[in-house]
Amino acid sequence: MADLPHFESKGNTIPNDGLPWWTGMTRYHWFVLVVAALGWLFDCLDQQLFILARPAAMSDLLSHIQDAKLLASEAQKCGDIATSVFIAGWATGGLIFGMLGDRIGRARTMMITILMYSLFTGLSAMSVSIYDFAFYRFLTGLGVGGEFAVGVSLVAEVMPSRARPYALSLLQALSAFGNISAALINLGLGMAEGEGFVSSPWRIMFCIGALPALLTIVIRRNLKEPDAWQKSRAEGKVVSTTQAYRELFGHPVWRKHALLGLVLACSGVIGLWAVGFYVPDLTRQVQTKPVTAAVYAAEIAAAEDSGNTARATALRQVQEAVSANAVEGLGSELLEVKRSVDPKIKGRLTYYQSFSSIAINVGAFFGMFGFGVLSQRIGRKKTFAIALLAAFVSTVTVFWTLRDLWQIFVLVPIMGFCQLSLFGGYAVYFPELFPTRLRSTGVSFCYNVGRFVAALGPLVKLWLNQVFRETPEPLRYAGVTMCLVFLVGLFVLPFLPETKGKPLPE
C-alpha cells in the first residue's frame, strides 16, 4: 500500500450512509451529466453507424470488381483496414485532446471533439473510393478519441462524491442508446432498401451522423468548467500540453497507473473492436444462405401465383447458379433477374444484422451500469476480474455456437452485458487514478493509447481469417482465438490500487 499516499486528500471521501446515490445532486449536476452523456452517446452512435455501414460501404466502393467471391474477400479485407485506420485516428485524437482537456478545459475541448467527429462522419457519406473513405474515418477517429476522456473527467470533477461512481457508470451505460439508435437507423434504411425506396443507405447513415454537431450550441452557451479544474488553473497547476506527459511519466505512481491502466484497457478495447463488434458481421454471414433460399422461394411462389411461369423458371436458374457460386456464367437477362432480388436479400440480412447490434447494446446498458453498482459493493478490482472472465466465456460461446436466430436474442445480449461492463469500469476507475491537473491526460492515455494496439486487432483477425480460410466459416474460428485478449487484463489487476470509497487524488 506504499504507493497510495495520493489518495489521502480530504473533503471528497465517498460517504457510506445508505442514502440514494443521487442525494445532493442539483439541477446543474443533472445538466452536466445529460450533456456529457449526450456527447458520448452521439460519439457511440457514430461508431456503430460505421460498424453497421461497413459491409455495404465496402461493397459499393469496390463495385468495379465483377467476381462475387473476389468482391466479398476484398470487401472484408478493406473493411478490416478501414477499421484499423479509424481506431488509429481514435488513439491519436485521444493523445492530443486528452492533453488539451487538461490545458484549455473540459467543456471547450468537448465542444471541439464533437464538432470534429460530426463533420467528418458527414463527409464519409461523400466517399468515392476506399482511400478517401479511410481518410475521413481517421479524421472522425480524432474527434471520437478525444471526447471520452474530457467527458468522464468533467463528470468526475463536477459530481458530488456520493454520486460520482454511479453517474460515471450511467454516463457509459447511456452510450448503449447511441448504439441502439444506429441499429434502428440501419434497420429502417434496410427495410427501405428492401422495398426499393433507397439505394446506398450507408451514405444516408453517415449524413445522419453529422447531426450531433448541434449539441455544441448547448455546450457553448451553458456548460462551465469544473471548479476543481478552475482552482487548479488559478493555483498555476495546469500544465502545458508538452509538460503533461512528462509529468505523467515522471511521477512513479502516475506512471505505474498509466501503464497498468493501459494494459487493462487493451483487454476490453481489443476484445470489443476486434471481436465483439464483428458479431453483426457473423450474423450476416451465417444467415446469408438461409435468407437467400427463403427470398428466392418466396419470389418463385409469387411468380407462380401470378401465372408468370417464365419468371419462375428464370428465378430457379438464378437460384441454382447462386447456390453453386456460378453467377459469372449467367446471361444478361438472368443477371437482371438476380439484380431484382438482391436488394430484398440485402434488406433482410440488414434486419438480422441490426437485431444483433440491438441485442448487444441492450445487454451493454445493464452491464455498464451494473459494473458501477457492483464495484461499490465488492470493489473495483474484484468486479474487473469477474467482468474479464465473463467476457471471455460469453464471447467464445457466441462465436462458436451462433447459428440460429433465437441465439441473437439470448446469447448475444449476455455477451454484450459481459463485454461492455468493462467499459463501465473504465469510466468509473480511470478518473480515480490521476490528479486533477493530469486527469484528462491520464484517462485518455489509458483508454485511447491502447487503441494503437487495438488498431492491430482487425489486422490480426484478418491474418487469422487467412489461417482458417480452409474452414467453412473462418470468422468464427478467428473470433474464438482473439477472445484470449480478455484474459490479459487479469495479469495487471493485482498491481493496481483499489479505489472504492476513496477520494479523487489531488
Image (cartoon, helix red, strand yellow):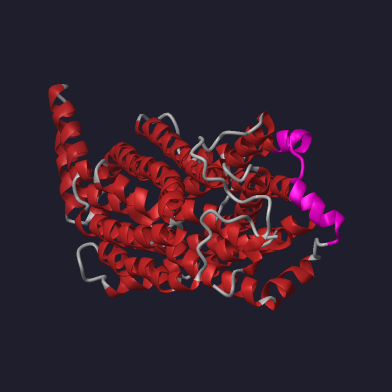
457 shown above or below 86: below
Q: Position of residue 292 (x, y in %)?
A: 22, 43
Q: Is residue 268 left or right of residue 471?
A: right
Q: Is residue 45 left or right of residue 154?
A: left
The single residue placed furthest to the top in the displayed view is 306
**Quarter of the image where one finds residue 65:** bottom left
Residue 310 visible, this orientation: yes
Q: Is residue 217 left or right of residue 7?
A: right
Q: In percent of the image, x 37 and y 65: which residue is there?
A: 486
| Magenta highlight on residue 133 | no
251 shown above or below 345: below
Q: Position of residue 281 (x, y in %)?
A: 34, 52
| Quadrant (top left, top right, bottom left, bottom right) of the C terminus | bottom right
| Magenta highlight on residue 223 | yes
Given residues 53 and 437, the one toward you in this image is 437
Q: Which residues are magenta?
A: 216-236
Given residues 42 and 369, the one toward you in this image is 369
Q: In percent of the image, x 25 and y 55: which residue is there?
A: 398
| Quadrant (top left, top right, bottom left, bottom right) of the N terminus | bottom right
Q: In percent of the image, x 55 and y 46: which residue is there?
A: 168
485 shown above or below 282: below
Q: Position of residue 274 (x, y in %)?
A: 41, 62
Residue 75 visible, this orientation: no
Q: Position of residue 89 (x, y in %)?
A: 60, 62
Given residues 10 and 58, the one toward you in this image is 10
Q: Is residue 52 left or right of residue 92?
A: left
Given residues 16 and 400, the one toward you in this image is 16
